[in-house]
Image: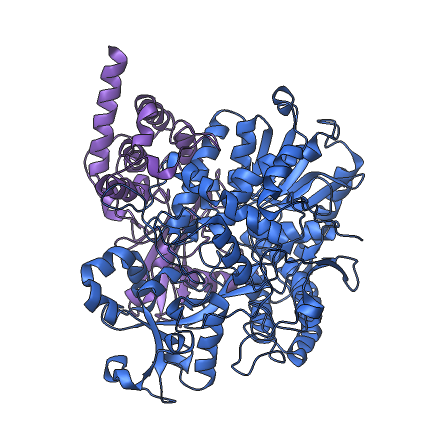
Chain colours: A blue, B purple
Amino acid sequence: MKLDAKIPSGPMAGKWGKRKFEGKLVNPSNKRKYKIIVVGSGLAGGGGAASLAELGYNVDCFCFQDSPRRAHSIAAQGGINAAKNYQNDGDSVHRLFYDTVKGGDFRSREANVHRLAEVSNAIIDQSVAMGVPFAREYGGTLDNRSFGGAQVSRTFYARGQTGQQLLLGVYSALSRQIGAGQVTMHPRTEMLDLVLVDGHAKGIVTRNLVTGKIETWAADAVILATGGYGPVFYLSTNAVGNNVTAAWRAHKKGALFANPCYTQIHPTCIPVSGDHQSKLTLMSESLRNDGRIWVPKKQGDTRAPDNIPDTERDYYLERMYPSFGNLAPRDISSRAAKRACDEGRGVGPGALGVYLDFRDAISRLGLTTVQERYGNLFDMYERITGENAYQMPMRIYPAIHYTMGGLWVDYDLMSNVPGLYVLGEANFSDHGANRLGASALMQGLADGYFVIPATISEYLVGQAPGEVGTDHEAFRKSTGEVDETIKKILAVNGRRTANSFHRELGLLMWEKCGMARNEAGLKSALDMIPALREEFWENVKVTGTGDDLNKELERAGRVADFLEFGELLVTDALHREGSCGGHFREEYQSEEGEAKRDDENFSYVGAWEYTGGAPVLHKEELEFEEVHLAVRSYK
Amino acid sequence: MHLTLRIWRQKNARDKGKFETYEMRDVSPDMSFLEMLDVLSDSLVEKGDESIAFDSDCREGICGMCSLTIDGVPHGPDQGGTVCQLHMRRYKNGDTITIEPWRAMPFPVLKDLAVDRSAFDRIIQAGGYITSNMGSAVDANAILIPKEAADMAMDAAACIGCGACAASCPNGSAMLFVAAKVSQLAHLPQGESERTQRVLSMVGQMDDEGFGNCANHAECEAVCPKEISVSHIAKMNREFIRATLKGAV
């Protein structure tokens, strides 16, 4: 299979304009004849559904939560980047583009990233117009803060709830279209299969999570905006409902899965407290604007933090990366924390933690300012740990936060399956091997608000609207398969809960394929995962029936998919013999312990094809015209 | 610690429902309240019983999905937080805890502790937005908004749409939820064009859904996980009166 990314020719800065001009359009009066399915209601999906509906398309939007307003975009705390240069500190579209390509450790597609930087400003304009209450200066203009991996202040924020406010902006636009009848919303509905007709994506099969009813939906194109796969690690900062099911089932229908091993570990999360734990809570990266990260210089130093004098503290990020300091990118900061703990200098229970200290910020800015900036985060921390971070430093440790890999898409965000588009975290395209802070919100909204409305018409023009209905044989077949899987899960009647399998898989993934990976560990994971999967199908216990609201059944279906997907993730990690960004292979590191890339052999997108047996790798070679491949340095 | 849980079990919307009692041993103070319910659910499944149906997703107090009434109080005993943020260190050995779903007529129970809150979505669909098609916006700094106004709008915008306000109100009123959106948009210049119609439409929909009216109990503010002030209800009332008078002229 030849992967054609369909990148427009010509100079980088002109590509998006050229694409918009050259792409075929659907006449305004013909748009109403088309139906588009959107799965997911976060920034990408909800934003896409709203913007397509504004254009006049008929949209069916699906989410598994009880309302589109709950999509996990809501949990993003810190902010959203844009190249406004409102701070007069030398920012530009080119700089945002450059920082993002470099931040991704040269594993993203340049043309996509450039487009992302280009539309970033319109996202801020649009969000403000919709009433998103970004933080402002006294004069009434917008305020900015700094985020990791950048030396300019380009991050717009709404207290510590930027994702919430942007999502509520999306939700309001979506609600307007639902009210107008242009979008039909299907909450508490889970996609369980993609339906192909003559090789084109023409619909989906869903389960109504309240009644258990299996239903079919036909459309002229299908958009997946179903988020990432972080919970394959069980513990992550993701919502407990986040899953890979929609993407995985599309993969099994032919969509290639790209770079699954690119997973992001966020450096500032609250450490694990016990086996009962269902998730890990992120402390926003914005805290690193004012908080200083340190561990004791001495190993096994169990003194209380205020009894350790400054001379005996190691502010290791400031020491190792003086120009970026505490704002070094996420992958680098995470590994530095791991190294400190591996050296026996970790703090707190199990010595798996480092300090994030606000003592100096409080004396410099005053308690009130610190409270104003980060109050909600300090409150959140206290609820979970019972500790007051104004009086003693926070303890933090890295955790799975975001997944850069996803379904392969071309420049138009269409997968290799004609008519199947993938937006937001669910695709692979913009963040390479490491995502910079405040870029996920930017990408979700770019894809939903501005990219998909401009690119989908090219495909639709070639389709006779409404040609395929749910009476087509392909829908019956898919429904049969979905029914079969549900019956099979309910019939096992073993002794272990789906949750226990999920937990075991997650622990295995974290240990063998987490922050640091090596050949032996990955190979052992490839033995363990199939064995666990086999046990699942022999020994899982799901009570209740398929005919009503059954959280156990929902979970079991998702865990079954994670048990298949996890193996692909490890396979990808094993094949990529070289470190880059969040993918750190211990065999490939510099003398200082930094990720050592192999551009000669691995400067490609690894897109995997599902075969039922060993997955087949297809490569899209990455070409860097504008940003020259270099060792990423934040010193 | 050892706890006794009285949990509302209800098969579906038509079932009458009743309390069941469960004994929980070895509850760690570091567990969150929902993690304790996870542990209980797992043990029920292992015994062949159905797990307890309850809604939750982000488990960090922002998505608004979790919705339990604990000992009569929506979101439980901690102020300014959701159930998912409540931790077991709040309780002591030997406590008995009663867990129910949201109790409000427009929020029918779907199963056990999960309720249908789509009424809230319909209220927003009636007018809780600013009409601005993608691509039509002016430069973000062309609209100057004084910090105080932006901060006040943000205070209201912090609403997570969980429904605790209506669940706590003796009248089953959703006025705090509706007021939060009306007030947010009324504080912003972008919201001006649709100001009159918005409040009329949203209040109209709120009434149609069967929510009661405000009688100034302020229970909503007491349980609101985002501590949204009832002063926004006053703001909405002013907006409503203004809109009604304007309509009458």
| Quarter of image, res A614 | bottom right
Q: Nearer the viewer, residue B107 or A323?
A: A323
Q: In this view, does A499 lie above or below A41?
A: below
The foreground one among A26 and B235 is: A26
Residue at 52% x, 28% y is A54
Locate the C terminus of chain A by quadrant: bottom left
Residue B64 visible in the displayed image: no
Q: Is residue B224 in view?
A: yes
**What percent of the width, then of the height, locates residue A470?**
72, 32
- Report the side of A472 relative to A377 (left or right): right
Residue B57 appears at what percent x and percent y?
46, 53
The residue positioned 60% from the left and 53% from the top of the image is: A110
Residue A516, position as x, y percentages in the image = 56, 75
Image position, residue A560 (x, y; %): 65, 59
Residue at coordinates 39% horizontally, 34% vertically from top-left?
Answer: A129
**Image position of A525 with respect to A330: above or below:** below
Left/right placement of residue A81 relative to residue A447 reads: left
Q: Which residue lies furthest to the top in this view?
A: B249
